[in-house]
């Protein structure tokens, strides 16, 4: 399994260093801020988006699920990192590193878990916007391997963990809909929802 | 570096808020009367901010903001951007929307009045009920 992971890493990362423009593109996509801040900007827009109050209410509940999933995904990765440390691929293999050298655990990918948690929570409520976010999440996951900071299995585990958390959070929020509606009602009285 | 992060998130959020509220007809939070003005505003605010995030590692080669600090500055920037949008739109639209009634509850009301006009209406309603 580890050998397969390393071989796939060497193949994807081997694509780096050939065309400067593609390297520059994936370096930008792989950074810790662009995709996560971009996704949060989509959440901000979704909060006010909708042709009527019902659609907006659905979108706002999806934004709440995505925000909780984001926090839990971050917590999930931090907890896992405390028990399991996997060295970064560039420390063990002859990698084309296009990025700074992170020192924390490679497994699972933190940014990938967070971005997939946001994207999947939105996807469960809004296929169009969620699909768009999932596409960017996949691009980010691929770019993390391309620039040499993660093994493929790290990003797959991050994506699976993030999506699982988003699914559970959405299910719990639906189960607690009565309480969520009370909170939304208070927010409505303050004209913020 | 943390200030740069805060500033970029703030600027990006202002642009996104303006484009989204203007598109969805929330006159009370929009700085603009025309949709196209809001879209241009988003292009000149959110566009460069996101481009700066894209090139973040070229400017800060080893620069990473620690998770907790990043979360703090992100939330601060978002709250500041929302606050700024509510205050400035209330100042800009106060005269043009002052004769409108608050006919809807929640966010929907901000299609007709500014945030502070809606809050004042809520406050007056509570006072009358007492």
Image (spheres, rainbow, N blue to C red):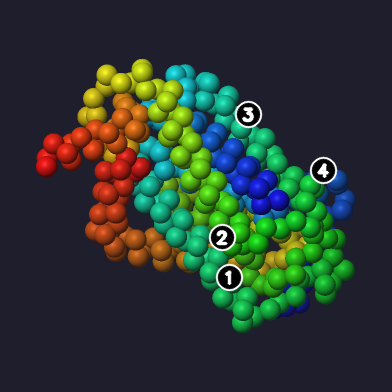
Disc 2 versus disc 3: distance between alpha carbons?
28 Å
Q: Is residue A16 above or below residue A6?
A: above
Q: In the rendered structure, the residue with mark 1 lies on which chain?
A: A
Q: What separation in Å lies between label 1 and label 3 (alpha carbons)?
A: 36 Å
Q: Is residue A38 visible?
A: no
> Callout 3: residue from which chain?
B
Crowd around label 2: few <14 · some 14–19 · many ≥20 (10 Å):
many
Q: Nearer the viewer, mark 4 or mark 1?
A: 1
Question: Residue at the left extreme?
Answer: B130
Task: Report which residue position mark 2 lands on.
Answer: A114
Q: Which type of secondary structure does the marked residue at label 1 adopt?
A: helix
- Residue A48 sits in quarter: top left
Question: Label 4: which residue?
Answer: A21
Of the two numbered discs 2 and 3 in the rendering, the one whose residue sits closer to the viewer: 3
How far apart are the alpha carbons under marks 4 and 1?
32 Å
Q: Earlier in the sequence, mark 1 or mark 2?
A: 1
Q: Are marks 1 and 2 in contact (CB under 8 Å)?
A: yes
Pointer 2 chain: A
In the rendered image, residues at marks 4 and 2 fall on the same chain = yes
Q: Which residue is mark 1?
A: A77
Closer-to-camera residue (B77/A166): B77
Q: Which residue is mark 3?
A: B44
Q: Residue at x 53, y 36 (%)?
A: B14
- The reply to whether label 1 and label 2 mark residues of one chain is yes
Q: Secondary structure at mark 3?
A: helix
Q: CA distance from mark 4 to mark 3?
A: 24 Å
Residue B78 appearing in the image: yes
Instruction: Check if mark 4 and mark 1 are on a common chain.
Output: yes
- Callouts 2 and 3 in the same chain: no
Q: Nearer the viewer, residue A84 or B127?
A: B127
- Marks 4 and 2, how far apart at CA: 27 Å
């Amino acid at each position: 399994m580890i050998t397969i992971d390393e071989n796939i890493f060497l193949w994807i990362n081997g694509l780096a260093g050939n065309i400067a423009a593609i390297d520059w593109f994936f370096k930008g996509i792989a950074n810790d801020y662009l995709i996560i801040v971009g996704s949060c900007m989509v959440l901000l827009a979704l909060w006010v988006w909708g042709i009527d109050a019902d659609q907006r209410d659905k979108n706002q509940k999806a934004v709440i699920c995505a925000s909780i999933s984001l926090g839990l995904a971050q917590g999930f990765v931090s907890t896992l990192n405390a028990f399991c440390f996997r060295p970064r691929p560039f420390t063990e293999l002859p990698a084309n590193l296009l990025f700074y050298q992170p020192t924390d655990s490679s497994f699972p990918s933190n940014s990938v878990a967070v971005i997939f948690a946001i994207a999947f929570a939105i996807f469960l409520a809004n296929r169009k916007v969620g699909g768009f976010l999932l596409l960017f999440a996949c691009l980010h996951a691929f770019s993390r391997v391309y620039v040499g900071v993660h093994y493929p299995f790290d990003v797959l585990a991050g994506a699976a963990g993030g999506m699982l958390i988003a699914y559970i959070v959405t299910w719990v929020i639906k189960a607690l809909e009565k309480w969520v509606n009370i909170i939304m009602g208070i927010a409505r009285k303050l004209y913020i929802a | 570096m943390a200030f740069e992060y805060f500033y970029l998130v703030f600027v990006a959020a202002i642009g996104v808020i303006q484009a989204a509220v203007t598109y969805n007809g929330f006159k009370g939070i929009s700085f603009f009367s025309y949709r196209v003005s809001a879209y241009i505003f988003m292009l000149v605010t959110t566009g460069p901010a996101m481009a700066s995030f894209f090139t973040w590692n070229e400017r800060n080669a080893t620069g990473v903001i620690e998770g907790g600090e990043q979360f703090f500055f992100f939330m601060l920037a978002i709250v500041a951007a929302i606050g700024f949008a509510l205050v400035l739109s209330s100042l800009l639209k106060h005269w043009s929307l002052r004769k409108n009634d608050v006919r809807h509850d929640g966010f929907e009301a901000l299609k007709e009045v500014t945030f502070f006009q809606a809050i004042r209406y809520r406050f007056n309603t509570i006072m009358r009920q007492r």
